[in-house]
Each structure stands twice: as C-alpha cells, then as structure tokens.
Image (tube, grey):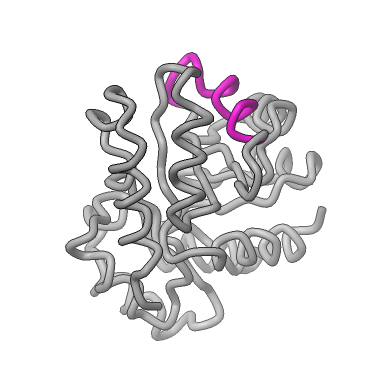
C-alpha cells in the first residue's frame, strides 16, 4: 500500500464520525458489548489501544461487530503492526512516526494515522505522502490554537487531534478546517465499562456523534 493510498483510506475512516473513541480495554468480555454500544450510538470507527494484555483479543472480538471499523492504537513497532493486522485491525494509529513503523504499515497494507505535534513533523510525513495525521498530544501541544496555526501554512494536511480532547473542547477542534475528526476516551468511561452500563455509553456516543463538523 502506498502512503497516498494509506492516507486516503485513513481519511475515509476518520470521516465516518466526528469522534473516534480511544479505548483502553482490560477485559475481553467487555469488547463486544462496548463496540456494539458505540456503533449503535453512531461512532463506528474504534481505536483499541495496545496498552493492555487483552488488547489484541479485544480487537478480534470487536472486529466481529456489524458496522464497526476497528483499529489498533499505540502502534510503536513493526511487530505491533503485524500483530494488529493479524488480529483484524483495519487501520492503525501511532503517537508519532518512524520510518520502520511507516514501512511496516505500508508492507502490511494497514492504513495509518501517524502522530505529529509540530509543523516539521507534519511536513516530513507530507513529504512521504501522508496528508491525514494524528495531532498528539493535542492539548499539551497547544490545543486548537496550535493546530490552527499549523494549518495556515500547511493546509493540505488534515488531522485527528487526540489527547485531552473532551466533550467540552471538542468543538474547538472540529470547527477547524484542517480537522476531520477527533479522538477521545470520554465516550467510554472506565466506571461505565466495568459496570457494564452499555446504555450510558451508547448515550455518550450519540452526543458525540451529533457534534457539528
């Protein structure tokens, strides 16, 4: 997969809804009902972070949910990429970008949202062929004003800001012309997941899915 094709595929996935849930799931038993609640609420693109021992099994289970588009987050190594693809991930997300990681995603045909926090990082990825990126960590890197500033001289690059994004500030990002969607964990609160309160999660997903872009 060429970087251009990978970026187009990632952009198409990012455009499915205003918010991509960023999920840290510890118990594989929660995977399917969590995915079903989020998809029912209007958030089909799901990022399962590779931060727990259960993550790959969670991806396998979520990939079975009709209407869901499941990706793997926190990709750091080529091994992560291969394992995520084998588990059924249809896209990847990384906090940053290295040549080895990009090479692996291209070789495996896994569309990637590579992370960038500066104009130089965005320019380097654009030079390689990536024009749909993750802005991370969004709030710590200056928030919406910083992303607006990067967009002025590099308008051909679009972003999915993640890191500190919440229902309170999501509109600040989504109103920017260089933002396609945002990533957030608030739609799947840990207490609601552990309690199996799928109705609450579906309600939070509906609120997020209704955000204007």
Residue at image coords 40%, 78%: 213
Image quadrant of residue 4? bottom right
Q: Is residue 11 shown above or below 58?
A: below
Q: Is residue 79 left or right of residue 51?
A: right
- Residue 38 can be seen in this image: yes
Name the foreground residue: 185 vs 160: 185
Q: Is residue 202 shown above or below 108?
A: below
- Residue 117 can be seen in this image: no
Name the foreground residue: 122 vs 185: 185
Residue at image coords 59%, 23%: 56
Q: Is residue 19 left or right of residue 142?
A: right
Residue range of the region highlighted in magenta in the rendering: 51-63
Residue at image coords 47%, 55%: 43
Q: Residue furthest left?
A: 168
Q: Where does residue 110 sit, x and y in percent of width and height?
A: 72, 45
Q: Is residue 141 left or right of residue 43?
A: left
Q: Is residue 86 magenta?
A: no
Q: Main secondary structure of the magenta part?
A: helix
Q: Where does residue 45 sit, x and y in percent of width and height?
A: 54, 51
Q: Is residue 162 left or right of residue 143?
A: right
Q: Is residue 60 magenta?
A: yes
Image quadrant of residue 90? top right
Q: Where does residue 127 sit, x and y in percent of width and height?
A: 64, 67
Name the foreground residue: 94 vs 58: 58
Tell me how many marks there are: 0
Q: Is residue 37 shown above or below 192?
A: below
């Amino acid at each position: 997969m060429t970087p251009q094709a990978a970026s187009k595929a990632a952009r198409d996935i990012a455009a499915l809804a205003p918010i991509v849930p960023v999920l840290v799931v510890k118990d594989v038993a929660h995977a399917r009902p969590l995915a079903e609640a989020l998809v029912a609420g209007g958030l089909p693109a799901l990022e399962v972070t590779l931060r727990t021992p259960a993550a790959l099994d969670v991806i396998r289970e979520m990939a079975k949910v009709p209407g869901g588009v499941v990706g793997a987050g926190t990709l750091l190594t080529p091994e992560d990429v291969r394992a995520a693809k084998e588990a059924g991930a249809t896209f990847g997300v990384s906090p940053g970008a290295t040549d080895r990681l990009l090479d692996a995603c291209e070789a495996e045909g896994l569309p990637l949202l590579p992370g960038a926090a500066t104009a130089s990082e965005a320019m380097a990825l654009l030079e390689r062929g990536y024009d749909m990126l993750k802005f991370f960590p969004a709030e710590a890197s200056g928030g919406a004003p910083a992303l607006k500033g990067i967009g002025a001289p590099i308008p051909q690059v679009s972003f999915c800001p993640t890191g500190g994004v919440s229902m309170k500030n999501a509109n600040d990002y989504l109103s920017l012309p260089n933002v396609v969607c945002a990533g957030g964990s608030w739609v799947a609160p840990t207490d609601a997941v552990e309690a199996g309160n799928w109705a609450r999660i579906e309600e939070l997903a509906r609120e997020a899915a209704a955000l204007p872009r």
